[in-house]
Amino acid sequence: MSKSQRTKGAAGERELANLLSDALGLKVTRNLGQARDSGHDIDLPGFSVEVKRRKRVALLYEAMEQAQSGEGTPTVMLRADGKEWLVVMKLPDWIKLAREEIAK
């Protein structure tokens, strides 16, 4: 991975951490040891978040495997150049969240 790719990835992680902090009202931080440990990118209570910030988004299954390194619900958050952020989860995890939302 080139230096510019690492820089873009780190900028995407910071961007998303700031967006989530503002939206959720809590301090969302980057997992700075993830590059060395091949783990998830962002620490968010209940979730293991892998962040992808690229020109074009691909390799979702590989990203999901990285997200599974944590104890929380594996989640991939991604954004291609000029596009909005998207969230990818396994269907059973999404169904659990949907049931909780519907039960309100």
Image (cartoon, rainbow, N blue to C red):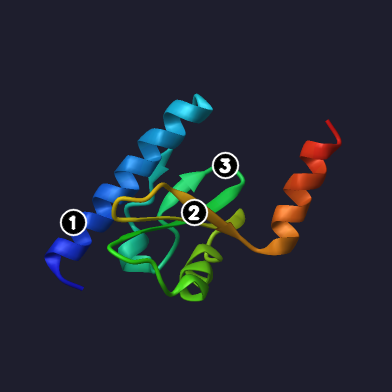
Outermost residue to the right: 103
Q: Amino acid at mark 3?
A: Pro
Distance from Cα at disc 3 to Cα at disc 2: 10 Å
Q: Residue at x 80, y 40 (%)?
A: 100
- Viewer-nearest residue: 18 or 57: 57
Q: Amino acid at mark 1?
A: Thr
Q: Which residue is mark 2?
A: 49
Q: Amino acid at mark 2?
A: Val
On the image, which quarter does residue 37 sit in? bottom left
Q: Position of residue 33 (x, y in %)?
A: 34, 57
Q: Secondary structure at mark 1?
A: helix
Q: Which residue is mark 3?
A: 45
Q: Residue at x 13, y 65 (%)?
A: 3
Residue 40 appears in the rendering: yes
Residue 7 image label? 1
Q: Residue at x 77, y 54 (%)?
A: 95
